[in-house]
Image (tube, rainbow, N blue to C red):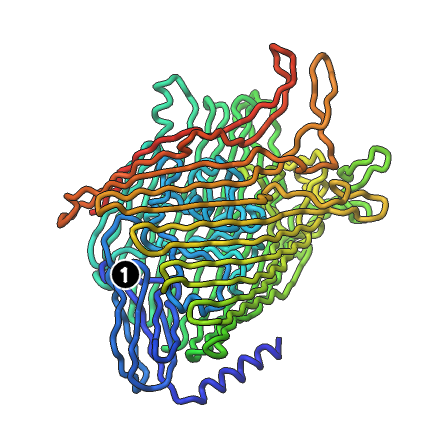
């Protein structure tokens, strides 16, 4: 570490020794006065530039002189002007939208040569303009569903929560909303995401080459920022659909200085179920809010919140509710024109409950964390930018509590033991431009995780909670030999790791570059789930005496090309991921309400590798992309000694999220200012599963037999579907305050019955065995009216 800091010190001295001046400032949307993220600030004569950070700030140190400056951002008119730099200067810019539109989110294209030059790779960015054009089920625009159209990103199928990145599990994704951790990104078990597209300002998905400021997960980082609100005028935006509606209000608190934004969403399809004598219910609602106050050019304060809840019930006898609560208070401070800082105090809570009235009890569980982080960005000069900071997260885990909800239930109250942990991290990283062809990003993160004391902790003979039964040839849970009690301040286990990060970009010419990246990540939290996708009843647990942290090494190499001056672009990447200490489950593992979870899990390893190709058409009336991923995702848990076979006989087997082939095709055609047509097609190799290898008969019933040594050896049928939509923007929108549009869509045009699962059973009438496929959606039409005033 001393050598690394010494290197940074020498580099900083060398750059300060040159006679240069600094230009810095903030870039705003001229209409709303909101800051813009990722705006390109470029000096063509110097072949150098930078981009605005997450709060719209930029800083660049260059030689004195008179230069042309280009300030460009997708969807906005580019500013081209001449500027004379003789001394340091603060220069703010305001960009105007090139066209007015209701569309809120778009996948940003790499149309600027600066993106070809930067070493950042394995990143997909979404900014303000058109995800709403992507056809989705039930007509509800959805960020997660749009990410799945990108290479390396898949889902477990319709009605499945979460998403998978480069063969990783859903719990290996770090999901941040205004820097606050979101533990469940799905509404209604995956039919919708928790992110209201109206309030989202910027989205980045990091699949590899992950910056050192991020940590705690292995596969990806989904970094989402909410809008700040219009500090000039009051505006309302919303939409009315068949199953849900949404409304956003924004405006100034003090003009040009302070603003607010409040957005709400709710589904209401369940209200119509009683008309069909159906007492079931399934609905969600969420509320986003944000206020900000700009004290002066050096100090801004933000307060953002999110609250969302889902409720699913069957005849009042079964009710499942779950949701997220987050709150973040942030302070931006500019120490100088070269040092930007952000201090955040964050609260995040994920709760999940269950009421089983026919049994007579309620179940409640969740995870809560308190997070403080302080980040700095030091713009030394046009070739060297330094980032550093600290982060501390304190977490409380409530695995579950059972409470009887009526006197005659016969259920005894039971409380699983709460768990506590603290995770501290510090990082330092740099963006270093060696010359006009070679650029680097490198840094290191240090993380220290402490499992804190709890009321009770079982002890086991030889510290081994899982035993192998030689007689029956199977793994079994060990019996506890005793119980230790601890104070909260006690340390049950601690782990510390260095996590180096490195990325390189080499410019072959102005249109072509190759990139390399390596990152090491550590994940101290684990989602205990033996299903193919997370459910609200899955339990998060921290690393500790019996559960080791997961460790990842990922390598990637890519080729990037801008074609016909950015009209087309080609991105290809190959990656390899190696994971240590991936949790695996013994056969017959029970995860629900298990106070001794260490007795059903083993530590194994995992790997994933593949090739991603993304071809985009970025300009013209027709835009779109073709994404293809060829990949493999496997897991292995060998025996702990020569006398144990391990899981699946110690052989590698497919993870539940292994998809050999993944093809996505998206297109948008603007026929006129009035009509726009959109379509997307998806094809994925079928999800791994297990089919029976035999059967036995008991009491006249045939019971299927599964081979414990053939985990995920079979597959569901291939998944594919075609979606289309048409957007009608009435001519009367022109020159009036009320702007409206109609979106008509058909999800799964040819009615493909994609298999969510296949179950094997004996037909009660014919007494013959049969395989029964469960499908979620067939053809689904939708209509949505969006408005803005």
Left or right side of 578 for 27: left
Residue 140 visible in rendering? yes
Residue drawn at (65%, 52%) of the image:
607
Up the image or down, 743 lies above or below 564; here it is above
- The quadrant in which residue 274 appears is top left
Q: Secondary structure at mark 1?
A: loop
Rate crowding at label 1 as few (under 14), some (14 to 19) or many (20 or more) other CA atoms within 10 Å: some
**Quadrant location, the N terminus:** bottom right
Between residues 427 and 691, which one lies in front from this camera angle? 691
Left or right side of 428 for 470: right
Total label count? 1
Up the image or down, 710 lies above or below 7; here it is above
Up the image or down, 771 lies above or below 381; here it is above
Picture coordinates of residue 655, whole percent (x, y):
63, 43
Up the image or down, 213 lies above or below 435; here it is above
Residue 178 visible in rendering? no
Between residues 641 and 665, which one lies in front from this camera angle? 665
Residue drawn at (74%, 17%) of the image:
697
Residue, disc 1? 76
Residue drawn at (52%, 72%) of the image:
440
Q: Residue furthest left?
A: 735
Picture coordinates of residue 469, whole percent (x, y):
83, 37
Left or right side of 278 for 400: right
Picture coordinates of residue 546, whole percent (x, y):
71, 49
- The quadrant in which residue 450 appears is bottom right
Left or right side of 283 for 706: right
Q: Residue furthest top?
A: 765
Picture coordinates of residue 778, whole percent (x, y):
44, 29
């Amino acid at each position: 570490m001393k050598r690394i800091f010494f290197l940074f010190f020498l580099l900083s001295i060398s750059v300060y020794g040159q006679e240069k001046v600094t230009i810095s400032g903030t870039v705003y949307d001229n209409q709303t006065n909101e800051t813009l993220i990722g705006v390109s600030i470029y000096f063509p004569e110097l072949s150098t530039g930078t981009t605005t950070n997450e709060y719209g700030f930029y800083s660049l140190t260059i030689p004195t002189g008179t230069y042309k400056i280009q300030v460009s951002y997708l969807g906005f008119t580019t500013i081209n002007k001449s500027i004379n730099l003789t001394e340091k200067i603060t220069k703010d810019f305001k960009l105007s939208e090139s066209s007015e539109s209701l569309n809120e989110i778009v996948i940003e294209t790499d149309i600027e040569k600066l993106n070809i030059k930067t070493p950042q790779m394995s990143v997909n960015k979404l900014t303000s303009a058109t995800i709403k054009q992507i056809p989705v089920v039930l007509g509800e625009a959805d960020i997660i569903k749009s990410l799945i159209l990108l290479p390396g990103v898949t889902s477990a199928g319709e009605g499945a929560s979460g998403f998978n990145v480069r063969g990783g599990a859903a719990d290996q994704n770090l999901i941040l909303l205004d820097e606050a951790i979101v533990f469940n990104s799905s509404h209604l078990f995956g039919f919708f995401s928790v992110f209201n597209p109206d309030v989202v300002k910027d989205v980045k998905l990091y699949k590899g080459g992950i910056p050192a400021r991020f940590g705690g997960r292995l596969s990806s980082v989904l970094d989402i920022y909410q809008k700040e609100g219009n500090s000039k005028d009051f505006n309302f935006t919303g939409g009315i659909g068949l199953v849900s509606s949404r409304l956003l209000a924004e405006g100034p608190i003090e003009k040009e200085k302070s603003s607010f934004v409040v957005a709400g969403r709710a589904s209401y399809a369940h209200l119509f179920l009683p008309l069909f004598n159906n007492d079931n219910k399934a609905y969600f609602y969420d509320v986003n809010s944000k206020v900000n106050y700009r004290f002066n050019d050096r100090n801004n304060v933000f307060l953002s919140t999110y609250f969302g809840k889902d409720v699913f019930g069957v005849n009042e006898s079964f009710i499942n509710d779950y949701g997220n609560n987050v709150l973040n208070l942030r302070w931006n401070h500019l120490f100088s024109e070269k040092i930007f800082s952000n201090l955040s105090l964050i609260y995040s809570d994920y709760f999940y409950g269950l009421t089983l009235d026919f049994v007579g009890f309620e179940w409640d569980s969740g995870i809560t964390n308190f997070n403080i982080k302080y980040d700095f960005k030091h713009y030394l000069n046009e070739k060297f930018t330094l980032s550093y900071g600290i982060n501390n997260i304190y977490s409380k885990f409530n695995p579950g509590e059972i409470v009887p909800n009526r006197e005659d239930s016969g259920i005894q109250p039971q409380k699983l033991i709460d768990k506590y942990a603290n995770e501290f991290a510090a990082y330092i990283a740099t963006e270093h431009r060696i010359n006009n062809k070679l650029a680097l990003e490198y840094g290191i993160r240090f993380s220290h995780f402490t499992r804190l004391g709890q009321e009770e902790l079982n002890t086991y003979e030889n510290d081994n909670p899982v035993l192998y039964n030689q007689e029956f040839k199977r793994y079994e849970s060990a019996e506890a030999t005793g119980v230790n009690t601890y104070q909260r301040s006690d340390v049950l286990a601690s782990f510390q790791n260095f996590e180096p990060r490195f990325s390189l970009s080499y410019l072959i010419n102005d249109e072509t570059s190759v990139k390399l990246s390596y990152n090491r990540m550590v994940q101290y939290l684990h989602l205990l789930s033996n299903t193919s996708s997370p459910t609200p009843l899955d339990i998060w647990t921290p690393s500790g005496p019996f559960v080791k942290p997961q460790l990842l090494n990922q390598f990637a190499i890519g080729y990037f090309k801008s074609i016909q001056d950015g009209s087309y672009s080609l991105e290809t990447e190959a990656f390899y991921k190696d994971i240590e200490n991936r949790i695996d489950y013994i056969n017959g593992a029970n995860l629900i309400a298990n106070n001794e979870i260490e007795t059903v899990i083993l530590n194994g390893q995992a790997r994933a590798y593949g090739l991603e190709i993304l071809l985009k058409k970025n300009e013209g009336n027709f835009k779109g992309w073709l994404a293809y991923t060829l990949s493999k995702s496997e897991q292995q848990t060998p025996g702990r000694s020569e006398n144990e076979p391990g899981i699946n006989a110690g052989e590698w087997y497919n993870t539940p999220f292994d998809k050999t082939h993944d093809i996505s095709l998206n297109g948008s055609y603007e026929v006129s200012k009035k009509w726009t047509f959109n379509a997307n097609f998806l094809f994925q190799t079928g999800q791994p599963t297990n089919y029976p290898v035999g059967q036995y008969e008991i009491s006249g019933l045939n019971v299927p037999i599964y081979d414990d040594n053939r985990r995920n050896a079979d597959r569901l049928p291939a998944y594919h579907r075609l979606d289309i939509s048409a957007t009608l923007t009435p001519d009367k929108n022109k020159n009036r305050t009320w702007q409206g549009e109609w979106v008509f869509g058909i999800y799964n045009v040819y009615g493909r019955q994609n298999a969510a699962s296949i179950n094997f059973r004996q037909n009660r009438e014919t007494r013959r065995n049969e395989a029964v496929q469960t499908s979620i959606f067939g053809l689904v039409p939708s209509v949505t009216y969006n408005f803005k005033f």
